[in-house]
Amino acid sequence: MISTMMLICLEKSDRLTEMNKVAFLFCVHNHQPVGNFLHVVENAYEKAYLPFIEVLKQYPFMKISIHYTGILWDFFKDHHPEFLETLRELVKKGQLEMMTGGYYEPILAVIPDADKVGQIKRLTQTIEEEMGVTPRGMWLAERVWEPHLPKYLKEAGVEYITIDDYHFKKSGLREEDLHGYYLTEEEGKVIKVFPGSETLRYIIPFHPAEETLEYLSRLQGSSCAAIFADDGEKFGIWPSTYHSVYEEGWLERFFQLIGKNLDWIEPVPLGTYADREKPLGRIYLACSSYMEMDEWSLPTEAMVEYGKVVERLKENPERDQIRRFIKGGFWRNFFAKYPESNDLHKRVLHLREKIGNEKRGSILKSQNSLLYLHRAQCNDAYWHGVFGGLYLPHLRHAIYENLIKAEALYDRKMHKEKEWIDLERSDFNGDGDEEVFLKNPELVLLFSSRGGCLLEMDDRSKAFNILGTLTRRKEGYHQKLLEAQEQALRDEGSEAKTKTIHEIFDSKEEGLDQYLHFDGYRRASFLDHFIAEPMDFESFRRCDYQEEGDFIKESYEIEVRGEGKQSEVLFSRSGSLWKNGKRDPIKIEKSFSIPTHQTILKATYQITYQGEKRKTNFGIEFNINLLAGDAPDRYYNIPGQNLEDRRLASMGALNGMTEVHLVDEWNKMEVVLKTDRKCNLWRFPIETVSLSESGFERIFQGSCLLFYWPLELEPKMRFEVSIELGIQPLSK
């Protein structure tokens, strides 16, 4: 009995049928994040991008589709124009089919529609200018698909894309249905979608090249297509792949094998295949990304359980039939999983809406503002899986840097006067809590009513958010860290093999399990603690201490006093102190104000107590991230103190303090904290243990400072303190 798929394949091109050739569609995607270190990008060029092309051009029968993001086009133009010349030659010879995409590799589904089209057209124009061809195919960032996309892809000039066969299987298709392309549409705007093979994605280039030929041979005689579409970095940058792919010659061996079998294998670019072959049918795909991404986007508990289900399935003889009906999460839930990611995303949307809605032509046409915002839409820092992504401070900083630059340009055009203060109240990030923006020409502050805390403090002159600290959270893979350490002991001395990044659970240093501390609240600044006696530094550092108050995670009331240059924001909460099941009422009022043209935030606290006599410790927590905990050019400077270890990743306790400086010589600035009451100080690093492409690693996420005062509370007692948090140019 002939399957529907076989009938479709038999109706294909007579030329292919007569020759019994398998069309091999080889598509490579290359990308580096906005803000990645230049030496990292250069290493990727030397280890992957350049050697891949150097090998490819030796085999002219290999015709492939290739995608470079706009970040890489900029890099090539600035640092390796000779590489562009090589690409031009291969394009002219028909070996390379160039593909477009969002210029700064955004998740298209979650950016404004105008930016979807604008980002794609920008990259298309760049390829036209550099290569002399107009790309018709597109790489979809992280293969994040949502059904509304075809309308905007078509508007941007896209005819076809490639995503994973996983997307198609979740819509009910079988493995044998996926050797070609399908049509999909939105509001009648039709595009072609190719399903990249999961099997090929896992065996190329990690298994012997012969295995790929064996896979292709199973399609021989069917006149169907085998589709590989995956990252170019796996050809040289992923761990051990430079050795296997180039030094051991995997890629040359692979191309040579194809060359010896051209009687039945035909390497074909996606566009050529789409032009000459008919679609396999129509398909409407559900919201999805690739299989691993759907797993990573799940909440931690669900991610762990999902992993267990997948592992159990491997032992089930009907695993293939069952697996196609099991799906993980949804990419957008990274915004629910990580509030830091949500704030970044909503900040960009918030400013984009202002620019888009502004009727003044000079602002609407501010291409520089849009350019910075497009850079701030780069996807990498918004999510986390096997790559560091959100966990990498320099990538988060790059998003903030471009956002701050865009907002500074916008505000500069909106305000004609030199000195001004703006205040805006709204739930801009959609979390159900009200936020307050307080801005002047030099500074942007973002407060949350939840905890009455400060989430963001931007120095416009440096385009730097000094509060970009990431909260320590339990991740689904942390159990694998413990298991990996045990496995490493068992594997010691055994022969190493090349692994995919989804199989690597090595550790970059010993004892990482000792850093698995998880926070019970979000790491922000001006967080108000009441800590029971006895105070214990280690317990607080591990976030394993007793909190007596109910202020850290609860809502504060907001009141705005004054207008314009006299604006002041007051947060207040009537809460409680708990001890031995007894509740004592206590109220915190804290006001914030900024000068018209300085990077200083002034805060005044008033605490009113109405309970019985008792002791407690009142503390104000700050989390400041200058991006490097161990760098010699970033350190603590505490007047009157000669610190043995002054690194920002150092820890310690001091008494009788009124002033602390965090110095950043690299950016020529320092963060200064001052208080009008002598206080005790605890300081320690916030460090996460996260999974990267090369294994587990410890990452510095910021410096935590707790200013605290031991209090002997009595009925109707008041406690007052003033604090300044400022950013100033380095004095030396």
Image (spheres, rainbow, N blue to C red):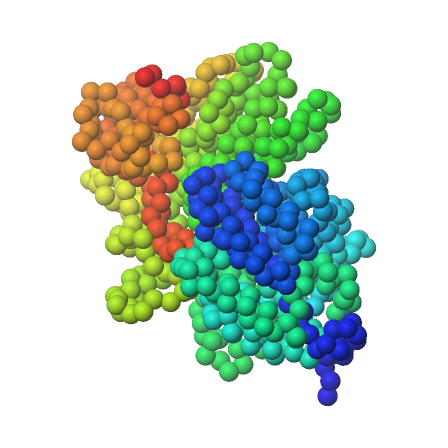
Nearest the eye: 437 or 41: 41
Nearest the eye: 103 or 43: 43
Judge from the rendering whether residue 589 lies leftward or rightward of residue 676; answer left or right: right
Q: Work out which quarter of the rendered image holds the C terminus and state it.
A: top left
Q: Tell me if residue 71 can be seen.
A: no
Q: Residue furthest bottom?
A: 1
Q: Residue 79: x percent and y percent?
A: 52, 38
Q: Residue 420: x percent and y percent?
A: 55, 15
Judge from the rendering whether residue 26 lies leftward or rightward of residue 690; answer left or right: right
- Which residue: 46% across, 43% down? 42
Q: Tell me if residue 403 can be seen.
A: yes
Nearest the eye: 625 or 338: 625
Q: Residue 684: x percent and y percent?
A: 28, 37
**As displayed, is residue 511 above or below residue 167?**
above
Q: Residue 83: x percent and y percent?
A: 56, 45
Q: Work out which quarter of the rendered image holds the N terminus and state it.
A: bottom right
